[in-house]
Image: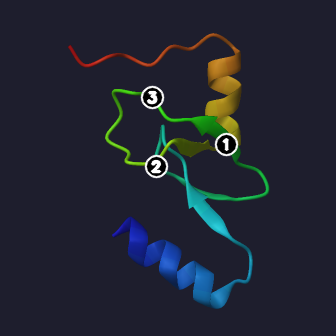
């Protein structure tokens, strides 16, 4: 579903969108921050994107819960 939304946006809007690795929200590439992927994440990529809201939350000291 998320891929369908991003595909439609890419067709209708020339701006590039990426998916936030933390909250899965579609975010404009110009506002996203590139971070190194966590070793334990499901991603096959070395790098992931964070939306501005998740950037602020992590900068304020919010921690992600680990699955354990």
Seen at 47% across and 41% down, the residue is: 23
Q: Where does the image place residue 37, in percent across and percent down from the top left?
A: 50, 35
Foreground pick, 1 / 33: 33
The residue indicated by pointer 3 is 38
Q: Where does the image place residue 32, in percent across and percent down from the top left?
A: 70, 48
The image shows residue 49, relative to residue 61, as above or below, that is below
The image shows residue 68, relative to residue 55, as above or below, that is above
Asked if marks 2 and 3 touch (Cβ < 8 Å), the reply is no
Q: Earlier in the sequence, mark 2 or mark 1?
A: 2
Residue 27 in which image quadrant: bottom right
Left or right of 62 in this view: 14:
right
Q: Which mark is residue 34?
A: 1
Q: Where does the image place residue 46, in percent across and percent down from the top left?
A: 50, 42
Mark 1: which secondary structure? strand
Mark 3: which secondary structure? loop
Q: Where does the image place residue 66, in percent across and percent down from the top left?
A: 32, 16
Mark 2: which secondary structure? loop
Q: Earlier in the sequence, mark 2 or mark 3?
A: 2
Quadrant of the image for the N terminus? bottom left
Question: Looking at the image, which residue sits at the far top?
Answer: 61
Seen at 48% across and 37% down, the residue is: 22
The residue indicated by pointer 2 is 24
- Residues packed near mark 2 inside 10 Å, few (<14), some (14 to 19) or many (20 plus): few
The image shows residue 23, relative to residue 31, as above or below, that is above
- Residues packed near mark 3 inside 10 Å, few (<14), some (14 to 19) or many (20 plus): few
Asked if marks 1 and 3 touch (Cβ < 8 Å), the reply is no
Foreground pick, 7 / 53: 7
Question: Looking at the image, which residue sits at the far bottom?
Answer: 11
The image shows residue 8, relative to residue 21, as above or below, that is below
Q: Which mark is residue 25?
A: none
**Inter-mark Cα distance, 2 to 3:** 15 Å
**Inter-mark Cα distance, 1 to 3:** 12 Å
């Amino acid at each position: 579903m998320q891929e369908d939304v991003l595909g439609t946006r890419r067709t209708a809007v020339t701006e590039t969108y990426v998916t936030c690795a933390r909250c899965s929200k579609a975010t404009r590439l110009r506002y996203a921050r590139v971070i190194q992927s966590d070793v334990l994440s499901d991603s096959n990529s070395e790098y992931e994107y964070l939306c501005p809201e998740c950037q602020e939350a992590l900068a304020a000291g919010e921690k992600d819960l680990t699955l354990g």
